[in-house]
Image (cartoon, rainbow, N blue to C red):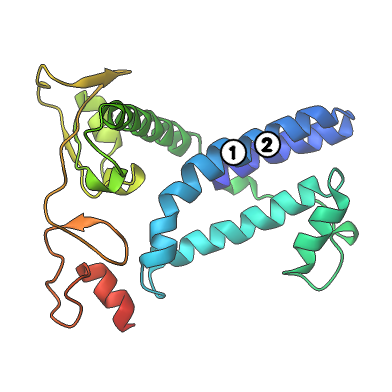
Amino acid sequence: MLHRLVEFDEVVRRGYEDYEFRKVVSALSHFMSSDLSAFYFDVRKDALYCDTKSSSKRRAALSVIEVLFDCLVRWLAPMLPFTMEEAFLERRPSSVHLEQFPEVPREWRGHELARRWAVVRRVRQAVNGAIAVKRTERHVGSTLKNAPRVFLAPDVLAKLSGIDMGEICTTSEMTLSCETAPEKRYTADRVSVVVEMAPGRICRRSWKIDPHVGSDPEFPDLTVRDAAAMRE
């Protein structure tokens, strides 16, 4: 997201300087609907709602959201003066119209990281497509009920190393493999997916299905992670 802010900072500044306001609105609208609402917030809502308060992942997400707020409100203030003023005053003591555009650090630019996350989003799109097909066939409901098996080329699998794709795809579990996919599969953009039901019991806090639900006797209906969050 920080890399994307660097890109949009250039688009917004150029648009205002050239009086091409429609380009500014179009770019930011697409960013908010596609990058934020449909992807980042969808992925991070579990950590924000269910992780422990001290979780580094949750705190990092809150820091990113703070930066997003600061940038978007200032960028949109010339177009939506009253709405952005109201939003800004909820978190700051003075008017947004007395502020300059934010100075987005160029150190946040990361082309290699952006290319890696483009692969992540491509795999996520394929998994969502496979689940959507099963949903139309009335085989599955919520994505959290699923534990897809995903078959990838070795080079693609390497780019996903260290990333929790179950969290990215908002499923309870996910298995990644470079083995040959079975015949009955969903395939899109070199990604093959077999959708299976997640094993275990449902957590009454995060709604994930996990075989370790009930491991903590004090919270018999929660996962280990959610039990720790309740205790904190």
Q: How many marks?
A: 2
The residue that mark 2 highlights is 29
Q: Are marks 1 and 2 in contact (CB under 8 Å)?
A: yes
Helix, strand or loop under label 2: helix
- Which quadrant would residue 44 be assigned to in this image? bottom left
What is the residue that sits farthest to the front in this orientation?
138
Task: Using residue 72 as the reference point, say whether residue 174 is left or right of it.
Answer: left
The residue that mark 1 highlights is 33
Helix, strand or loop under label 1: helix
Residue 195 in the image: x percent, y percent? 19, 33
Q: Where 190 sits versus 217, above or below?
A: above
The residue at 83%/47% (across/down) is 80
Disc 1 residue type?
A: Ser
Q: Where 188 sits versus 98, above or below?
A: above
Query: Split into 4 quadrants, where in the image is the C terminus?
Result: bottom left
Residue 145 in the image: x percent, y percent? 23, 46
Q: Which disc, if any, is residue 104?
A: none
Task: Using residue 231 as the reference point, say whether residue 111 is left or right of it.
Answer: right
On the question of residue 118 being in view, the answer is yes
Disc 1: CA contacts within 10 A as few (<14), some (14-19) or many (>=20): few
Disc 2 residue type?
A: Ser
On the question of residue 109 being in view, the answer is no
The residue at 38%/70% (across/down) is 55
